[in-house]
Every structure is written in C-alpha cells, then in structure tokens.
Amino acid sequence: MLKNIRDKLTLLPTSPGCYLMKDKTGTIIYVGKAKNLKRRVSSYFNRTHTGKTARLVKDIVDFEYIVVGSNTESLVLEINLIKKYDPKYNILLRDDKSYPYIELTNEKYPRLLVVRNINLKKNNRNRMYGPYPNVGAARETVNLLNRLYPLRKCNTMPKRPCLYYHIGECLGYCFKDIDNSTIKQMEDEIIKFLKGDASIVIKKLEDEMEKESSLMHYEKAKELKELLDYVNITLVKQKVEINDTKDIDVFGYYIDKGYLSVQVFFIRGSKLVERHSKIWPIIDEVDEELTKYISYFYNKDVLLPKEILVPNIVDMELIKEYLNVNISSPSRGVKKNIIDMACDNAKISLEEKFDLIKKDEARTYEANEELKNILGLEKLDRIELFDNSHLFGSFNVSGMVVFIEGLPAKNEYRKFKITNDKNDDYGTMREAMYRRYFRVLKDNLTRPDLIIVDGGKGQMTVAHEVIDGLHMNIPIVGLKKDDKHSTNALIYDKEIEIDKSSNLFHYLERMQDEVHNFTINYHRKLRSKGAITSILDNIEGIGPNRRNELLKKFRSIKKMSEASIEELDEILPHKVSVNLKEFLESYRGV
C-alpha cells in the first residue's frame, strides 16, 4: 500500500459520502458511495480481491472523498459524479440503453407511437405502456393495433385523404368530423389490450377472419390467422398467479465467479409481459451493487411502476426515498415466489453466458492490456483510429472510430468530408487529423491515449507532423501490412511483429475492419448523393456538351455503366469512352 493512501485511510470519517479513486495520471477511474466511508474505502486495501476489483485496486494511487448528510444524498452525488467524470470502472450508467414504450397520444385524434425519449413533463404518464426491452415487439404491437383500429397515422394533418383512408386503416380525420364516442371506444379497447386484456382484440380478429373466409378471401383470412397466432403466442404471455393488476417490476439476482446477474420482470395486468437481463463484473459489495443498479435503472427513461419487488439484501429505505415508490421484499406467498423465479432466471442467464463473457473479455480487455504493455504506455483507455477513402481523387473522405476499454464507442465516431479533391492520401490524412485535434484542443475534448493510422511510415510522418504542430503529446502507431494486405506489424519507435494467432492480432483486425467499414459506408452515402454531373466532371474529355448528350441518351449512371464501349463511342472519342467505362466500373465496385 502506498504511504499517502495509508495516511489518508487513518483520517477517513465514518460518515456517509462518496469516494473518487485515481490512477497514476490523476484520472478518476472509479466513483463509489458508502454509508461509512472509513469502512468501505479501507476494504479496498485490507483484504484480497479478485477479478475487476483486483484490477481497480492495482490502478489506484490516490483517492478523494466527499462527506454528505445522508445515504440518499450520497447516492444522488454518486450519480452526478459518474455522469461528470465517466470513470472507466463505473459501467452501470454507461452501458444500459433506454427502453421503448408505446404511447397512445393525448390528442383530439390520437396516434400510436413507439417512443424512447420520454418527456415526463408531458401529461401522458397514464398513456404510456411498456417498457418493451425488445423494440421489435413494440413495433409489431403498434402495427397490429393500427391494422385493427383506424386511428390517425399522419404526423400532421394532410389536406386530402391518404392511402390509409382508402385501405380502411384511417377514418379520414383530415376531412371528416368523427364522432368523439367512436374515438373513445377505440381508445378504451386499445388501452385494455395494452394493459394485458387481449380478449377484445382476439374476438375482433376471429370475427374478421370468419367473415373473410366466408367470402372466400382466403389470403386475407390467412393474414388474419397469422395475426391471431401472434397475439396468442407472443402477446398473451405467461400468466402470473397474482391477484394484483397494477404495474409491478420484480428484481432477482445471482452472483458467481465475480459476476452479478440481474433479471427484471415487468408485470402488467397480472401478466409477465417482458423481462430484462444484465450481467456485469462487480466491484462493490453485492448489496451495494444491486441497490445502485435498481436506483440507476429508473434514470434511463424507464417509467416507475406502482410497486417494486426486490430481494431482502437490497437497501429498500434508500430506494424508496430516492425513487418515491412503493418497494417491498415479501418473505412468503405469491410475490416471494415471483422474486425467486426472477433469481432463478438470473442464475440461468449467467450460467448460459459466462463462457461467452470470459471469451469476450479476453478479446477486449486482455488484448488492450497486451497492446498497452507492448507499447510501454502507462494508460490505454481510449484509442482513435483513422482511415481514408476516395474514388480517383473524388469524394475524398476520412473516418475516425473510437475504442474505449477495448470496445467500440459508436457515439464517438466522426466523419470528415475532405476539401482537397485530389488523389492525395497524405493530404487527406493531414486535413482530417488537424480538424479533429484542433477541435479537441479548442473545445477541451477527451484526448486519446493512442492514435492508430491505417498505413505505413508515410501516414505516420503526416500524423506526427499534425500532432507535434499542435503541441500535443499523443502516441501514434501505424499498421504495416504484408504482401497479402494483412497486418503483420506495428510501427512505433520500431517495427513490432504480431503473432497472427494472438488476441492482439484479432483485436487490431477488428479495429481495422470497423474504421474501414465506417469510412467506406460514409463514402458510399456521400457518393450516392453526388449529382450525376459531378461524377461525369471527373472524366477528362467530357465537357458540358458531351455530358448533356450522355445524360440525354442514357438518363442514369446505372444505364451508362451497362452500356458497351461501342455505344459510348457514338458520343465520345474512343479513348474517352474507355476512361469513362473504367471509371464507372470502379465507381460501382467501391
């Protein structure tokens, strides 16, 4: 234990508060909360740890702490500190996505929408249904209801009837005065269905199917039969033997080999309609991890249910005070059985996925650690990679992808449309990197611990010129390829050969594929938006007159590319025809 840590531990109070662990660079790598700061922080250094906790302790060289007045205050402060610093070892607030809900809009002529970003300030709390961890299920449900009930479909009212009116899926709200009782009846039936009562919808489908069948409209009857099967199999889920129709969320957990598995059941209208699973390596005590997870869970656009059922290790008073919701941990009866069922499912989930999780960790964290050690870096949390793409010097673009802790961070990716429209790979790299890191300096953005350029010494030279010119001290690595265009070495201070059977090789390969595909997709998208005239302007020998003749004869690039040389020769000199044909074939193949 470092002397400064030992000295600080003796000064820690026994009050509630938050602690911030730091690495050798002064970066905050973990934020935690505690009812008793002295006991909790000391536990990191006075006992043996395994897994991710051992990795955290190994990286700690200093810590800070903030004393607060209550356990609830420490939870609120912890959440705010994690959002502010995004520490590498705090993953709960970073990983989970928001959930889709189905909204029956509170408008004169209501619509059914699948929504993610919930505006709790709107007066629509009682018209939101879900959550649906599977967005496909939410969309299927909306499509089914829109098929059965002629609700309004348009975002804004059109001036004349649209296709939905003509096929019987809209009442024509834009030009008809629809009786309120008709709308109210549809709303009531839809709400019953979304609350778990499918009887009316099933009866509607059966009646319509019988009607179409009697009229010998067998294809239509078959379509209705498929919808009926969908309702019976997919939407009428497992009936929970509970005499309680209010919205209830149930949390269960299982811990093994340093991982915590959590299973969440969503019970709506006495039915288990959906469930959510989450597995992560734990750092804190199990009760603290589970309590924090439940608290964080409802920070992600998840509407609060009327009741939450939890295992008895959870700090119920803290959650109740923080969320202002009814929370309980029954010791017997039906609700206790449901918690046990959630715990059993958490165990099954961890046992099924554990081997996959460990393999994925070897492919990410361990490969990232190997790269850090090979390059002799103190820290390697964030890597930024660049790649270029162009077509005969036109549509020049560059792409940047970001890997954090060995995993792609897609919301951090950036695209660069290059202003210099020449076949100059070095110029493209210079412009993209300058624009990126000038912005990093200007806006004080997070700097990478490593930059990787997909190229050899020439690309490395350009990258160093940009970074040195901006007076930024960021390590840069190039990827050297063999004659089969496969990466076989890193270019750093010297060439470092890579074992092609190693996790590191596959890690680098994944990063290369990611940046290449990202850049190529952007290039294709940009190119597809380019006017035909812009494409033809790249061919020497094609001026305004010849360009207009080509467009008049062939109408599109596709037909032009399918034309023979002889057909092109009718308008162009033979040499220009050959150049155009080669260009268009390359254009289609990129």
Image (tube, helix red, strand yellow):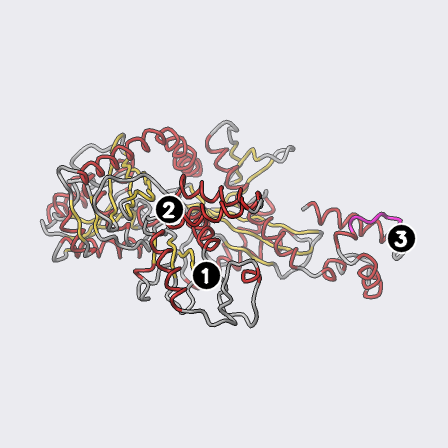
> Could you tell me if the residues under marks 2 and 3 are in contact, i.e. CB atoms within 8 Å?
no
Which marked residue is nearer to the observer: mark 2 or mark 1?
Answer: 1
Q: Amino acid at mark 2?
A: Pro
Measure the alpha-carbon separation of dots 2 and 3: 59 Å
Report how many numbered discs are placed on residues in the image.
3
- Dot 1 or dot 3: first in sequence order is 1
Report x, y in % for residue 94.
34, 49
Q: Amino acid at mark 1?
A: Leu
Report x, y in % for residue 161.
56, 67
Q: Magenta residues: mostly which secondary structure? A: helix
In the shown orientation, is residue 76 left or right of residue 543? left
Query: Callout 2: helix, strand or loop?
Result: loop
Query: Which quadrant of the structure image shows residue 359?
Result: top left
State the residue position of label 2: 133
State the residue position of label 1: 151
- Label 3 crowd (10 A; few <14 / some 14-19 / many >=20): some
Residue span colored magenta = 561-568
Measure the alpha-carbon separation of dots 2 and 1: 25 Å
State the residue position of label 3: 569
Residue 273 vs residue 541, the one in the foreground: 273
Query: Callout 3: helix, strand or loop?
Result: helix
Q: Amino acid at mark 3?
A: Asp
- Dot 2 or dot 3: first in sequence order is 2
Report x, y in % for residue 507.
48, 36
What residue is rendered at 73% in x and 60% in y? 532
